[in-house]
Structures are given as structure tokens and as C-alpha cells.
Amino acid sequence: MRTFISHRTLSRLAALALLAAPALRAQERALFTWNGRVDNDVRITVHSAAIHSELVSGTQLGRGRVNHVSPLPRRDGTVSVEKLAGCGTVEVVQQPSASNGYTAILEVTDADAGPDMYRFSAYFTPSGSVTSGGEVISSGALLSHGAALLTWRGRVDKDVMITIRGDRARTRTLDGAPPENVQANLAGGGLPAQDATLTLNQRQGRGTITITQQPSSANNYTAVIRIRDSRQGFGYYDFDIIWP
């Protein structure tokens, strides 16, 4: 027997899918797009609407072109980048906070022997509630199907484990230095007490992010995520854990 779905029903389903998008994405704002040639290493400092490019090493090839969208807000939050061109890396090495005057610092590092053209966009997302013990208390919009249960951003040295149970999420260092500049949001109500298969949406990270334990009655509805960074020094990670 065939089942037919009306155009009105399809439209309602599409609307529901849009409403289920992560609430934090709605808070994300575009800041600017940067274009320029980089020989080795360039540092970009962002404070409000002021964006300054500084040569760290290599040959000076200009200061780059900036297309402004909106200024960096004077509040705690996370700056993330989307690399659009270039063979090397673009990383956020300092997140804005009251202690640094709400200033973000980005570094563009070219991987080749010669210069390369780079282009990237920068975005800002307001931070959630992170305690001094690395614990996140649920906040923000209530959890819905297909939405972000946890959004996590920070710099990781070697090996970090994130545990989510109920309305709390805790970050623990297993190896290396403690993570830096951690910004996290746990959806309102936290992790429901029911079996589920969570999924990962990774935006940035040079190592691996793995959901090593799914919530079930056998583990008291606990989810465990591991971040493993095998390269020397800190690497920046930005990801969502999605509720099914």
C-alpha cells in the first residue's frame, strides 16, 4: 500500500526541521572576512571593529584586506573561523574575555616554502556557563530533536575527556596541560534519562574527537567524549554533540 504525503504536510515538516536547528547557531554572528598573501606566519588582532594584521615571521606581503560585517562584542564568547582558501592553518589563539579587554587573536600559518593566498571568515558565539572546576551547567534553549546537546570550544594539549550526565558536563584532563579558553553550552535540561545515540558535528580540530560512550540505563545515562591531540602544543577544537 502506498502512502501519500500532502504538500501541506511536507511544508510543516520542513518548518519543524528549521525550528530544530541548534539554538546556539541562531546566536552566532559573522564578524569579518580576511583576504591576504601569507609567507610564513601572520597574527591578526581583533578588538571591537578594529582589525590589525602583524607579521610574525616570513616576508611582509601586505596587511590583507578586511570586509567588515559587525564588531566583536564586549562580552565573553568564542570566535571561530572558517578557512575558505590557503594550504596552511588558521587558528584562534586567544578568545575574547574581560581579562584581555575582549580582544581576539588569530594566527595564519603557511605550510609551504613560498607564499600562498588565504581567505577566511570569522564568527562570534556568546559563551555559556563554565565553572572554575571545568563543569558546565545547562543553560540556553531547551533541547529539541536534531539540536546541539553540547557545544564545546577550546584549546587542547593532548588528551581530554568530557562527561555529560543530566544537567552537568565536566571536562577532565587525561594527559598533557589542562585545556585553555574553554567555552561550552549545555542545552537547557541537559542530557535526558533515556537511551540515545548521539552524533558529532566537528567544525575545527587537527586531532580526533570521539564519542566513546553513549547514554543508556547501564551507565546511568552518561555520555563520554574524548579529544585526542597528537601534535605538539595546543590545538583549537570546535564541535557540537547532537541529540538525535
Image (tube, helix red, strand yellow):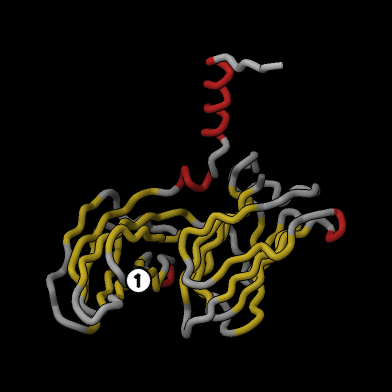
User: 172 or 8, which is in the foreground?
Assistant: 8
Position in image of residue 138 (x %, y %)? 66, 53
- Judge from the rendering whether residue 84 lies leftward or rightward of residue 232; answer left or right: left
Q: Is residue 105 visible?
A: no
Residue at image point 27% right, 70% down: 44
> Could you tell me which quadrant the C terminus lies in?
top right
> Could you tell me which quadrant the N terminus lies in?
top right
Local secondary structure at mark 1: strand
User: 98 or 60, which is in the foreground?
Assistant: 60
Residue at image point 51% right, 48% down: 24
- Judge from the rendering whether residue 194 lies leftward or rightward of residue 57; answer left or right: right
- Name the residue carrying label 1: 89
Position in image of residue 112 (x %, y %)? 26, 78
How many numbered marks does the figure carry? 1
> Mark 1: which amino acid?
Thr
- Judge from the rendering whether residue 203 lies leftward or rightward of residue 49; answer left or right: right
Position in image of residue 153 (x %, y %)? 51, 63
User: 136 or 43, which is in the foreground?
Assistant: 43
Residue at image point 63% right, 83% down: 175
- Judge from the rendering whether residue 189 lies leftward or rightward of residue 71; answer left or right: right
Q: Is residue 54 visible?
A: yes
Crowd class of label 1 (few under 14; some 14 to 19; many from 20; radius 10 Å)? some
Residue at image point 63% right, 65% down: 210
